Image (tube, rainbow, N blue to C red):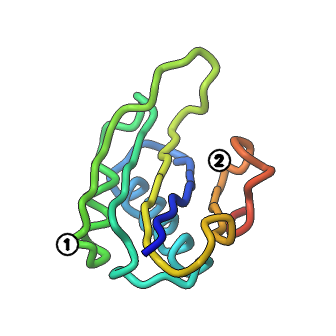
Amino acid sequence: MPVAAIRGATTLDSDTRDEVVARTQELVKRVMDVNELEPDDVISMLFTASQDVRSEFPAAAVRALGFGDVPLLCALELAVEGSMPCCIRLMMHVEGERDRRSYSHVYLHGAVALRPDLVAGGG
């Protein structure tokens, strides 16, 4: 079965546990909805967070959505000068019969500025 990677990102207004949970769940739900995916379609998810995100693991927010058997990994984003603050990025690996170019990437809130050329389900 073909495998594809879907990209996405969101930003936080402030680094609080509630904000990390809400924005991460919003991002994952939007990726799932826009791409008409079910949890069984998801192979794994990789999250990176800018170094100023310290209040919660994005993966913990996704576990609460029912992805208990999906491998999830969190890592720090490179601390490159001028990079976007309070940013959580996602790479979701999925399997399905669709061509990988048919999937939509989702960038929400301030993260829309990262890849305006890829924005389909965000804003």
Residue shown at the point (56%, 84%) measured from the top left: 36
* Between 23 and 66, the one nearer to me in the picture: 66
Indicate the secondary structure of the residue bearing disc 2.
helix
- Residue 101 percent across, percent down from the top left: 68, 65
Q: Is residue 94 left or right of residue 61?
A: right
Q: Residues within 10 Å of mark 1 (few under 14, many from 20)?
A: few
Residue shown at the point (64%, 20%) measured from the top left: 82
Q: Amino acid at mark 2?
A: Ala
Residue that mark 2 sits on: 111
Residue that mark 1 sits on: 68
- Mark 1–mark 2 Cα distance, whole angstroms, equals 27 Å
Q: Is residue 75 above or below residue 23?
A: above
Residue placed furthest toward the front = 1
Q: Is residue 2 above or below residue 55?
A: below
Nearer to us: label 1 or label 2 = 1
- Residue 94 percent across, percent down from the top left: 44, 68
